[in-house]
Structure formats: C-alpha cells, structure tokens
Image (cartoon, helix red, strand yellow):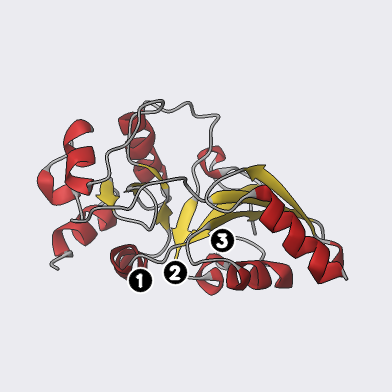
C-alpha cells in the first residue's frame, strides 16, 4: 500500500483519514496547524479535546508521563481497545487536553505505519461531530470534503470505540477510572484493577 501521499499530508500538518481496529480515525500531527485542520473539519468544540494515536507507550512517553500500571493495562486488554488519559510532561494545547492527554496504542498496520513515519497523530473519529462515521476511510474523507489522497485505504470493523481510562496519582497509588465506556466494558476494567490489588 502506497502511503507516501498520506504521510506527506501529515508532514504538511494537513488532516488524513486512516483505518483503525474500530472506526476510521481523523489524523493530523498535534501541531497548532494540524489541530486547526482537524477541529475545522469536525466542526468540533475547542473545549472537547482529541486523543493521540501512538505505536506504544514508549512513543507516548515523549508527550506524557507513563506509570508502570499503564504498561500492565495495555498488555492485559486487546491492542487498540484502550485510551489512557495520562499527565502531560508539559502543558499542551487545550485541544489535546492541556495538562492531561489521552493516548491510544493503535494496532492496525496502516495506523502503525503512519505513527512510525510522523510520530503521534490525532485519534478522533473521522466524522463531523454528532454524525455517525462510515466504516470505509475513503467515504469519510469524501464526506469531510477531503481529496481521495487524504484517505489511507481501509475498511474498519466498526462497533464501539476504545474505552477511555483516567490514570491519576503517582507510583503505586495510581487510581484507574473509566471515563467513557467502549469496546472494553467498565466491569472488565474494574475486575482487572481488583485482581491486581489482591
């Protein structure tokens, strides 16, 4: 699959649509220009932050502080199923969450190729806010008024998005809270946390 045009758009701080293991994502580098592009396309409220797609928590550690329990959580559940809200290493754009940023370790090969090429990119759904995204990336690009070369080809399985977890605290005292239910039910997360403490 030729992703050169998609990667070139990302490097130019333009938005692209890419496949994930759930729903198509709308991606741009987390620069002011990249975030401008994403928020304009989605007609999204600036007060609703977007998350970041990363290859792994090591890549995320350039942006956020990653406690040990985060590695355990990501290893305990299917790849790409969790988004972890973690403390930012330094205050970031409010559209990313400012002091805390949600990161999702992507699993789809195309998404991995993109974050390998350009670093973290936004991981919000590829649709105008409030609308239901299509499962095919090219359809979403067209709906958003993007050119065909802005879509990394792919059809997503659909279903629920990732489950958002807030990790708050330091060291062994980190608390895990479910902020938004998704593909992983809250009871499964709570059961994992309970068993870890046992």
Q: Nearer the viewer, residue 150 or 153?
A: 153
Q: Where's the C terminus, which quadrant? A: bottom right
Q: What's the distance in space between the residues labelled 3 and 1, CA to CA?
A: 15 Å
Q: Earlier in the sequence, mark 2 or mark 1?
A: 2
Would residue 171 be found to the left or right of residue 124 on screen? right
Q: Residue at x 50, y 71 (%)?
A: 56
* Labels 2, 1: front one: 2
Q: Which mark is residue 12?
A: none
Q: Nearer the viewer, residue 187 or 40?
A: 187
The location of residue 152, given as percent across then percent down, is 20, 56
Q: Which mark is residue 55?
A: 2
Would residue 41 be found to the left or right of residue 196 on screen? left
User: Callout 2 environment at 10 Å: few (<14), some (14 to 19), or many (20+)?
Assistant: many
The location of residue 170, given as percent across then percent down, is 82, 63
Query: Can see residue 145?
Result: no
Which quadrant holds residue 111?
bottom left
Q: Residue at x 23, y 47 (%)?
A: 137
Q: Which mark is residue 116?
A: 1
Residue beneath label 3, please?
Answer: 63
User: Callout 3 environment at 10 Å: few (<14), some (14 to 19), or many (20+)?
Assistant: many
Q: Are marks 2 and 1 in contact (CB under 8 Å)?
A: yes
- Looking at the rendered structure, the secondary structure element under dot 2 is loop
Q: Nearer the viewer, residue 154 or 187?
A: 187
- Looking at the rendered structure, the secondary structure element under dot 3 is loop
Q: Are marks 3 and 2 in contact (CB under 8 Å)?
A: no
Q: Where's the N terminus, which quadrant? A: bottom left
Q: Residue at x 17, y 45 (%)?
A: 138
Would residue 142 be found to the left or right of residue 74 on screen? left
Q: What's the distance in space between the residues labelled 2 and 1, CA to CA?
A: 7 Å
């Amino acid at each position: 699959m030729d992703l050169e045009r998609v990667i070139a758009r990302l490097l130019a701080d333009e938005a692209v649509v890419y496949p994930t293991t759930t729903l198509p994502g709308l991606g741009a580098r987390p620069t002011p220009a990249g975030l401008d592009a994403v928020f304009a396309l989605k007609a999204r409220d600036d007060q609703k932050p977007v998350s970041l797609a990363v290859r792994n928590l090591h890549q995320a550690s350039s942006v956020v502080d990653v406690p040990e329990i985060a590695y355990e959580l990501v290893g305990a559940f299917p790849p790409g199923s969790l988004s972890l809200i973690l403390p930012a290493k330094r205050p970031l754009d409010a559209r990313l969450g400012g002091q805390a940023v949600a990161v999702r370790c992507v699993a789809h090969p195309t998404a991995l190729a993109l974050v390998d090429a350009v670093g973290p990119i936004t991981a919000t759904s590829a649709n105008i806010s409030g609308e239901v995204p299509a499962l095919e990336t090219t359809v979403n690009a067209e709906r958003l008024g993007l050119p065909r070369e802005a879509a990394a080809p792919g059809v997503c399985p659909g279903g629920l998005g990732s489950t958002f977890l807030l990790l708050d605290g330091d060291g062994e005292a980190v608390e895990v809270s479910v902020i938004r239910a998704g593909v992983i039910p809250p009871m499964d997360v709570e059961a994992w946390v309970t068993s870890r403490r046992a």
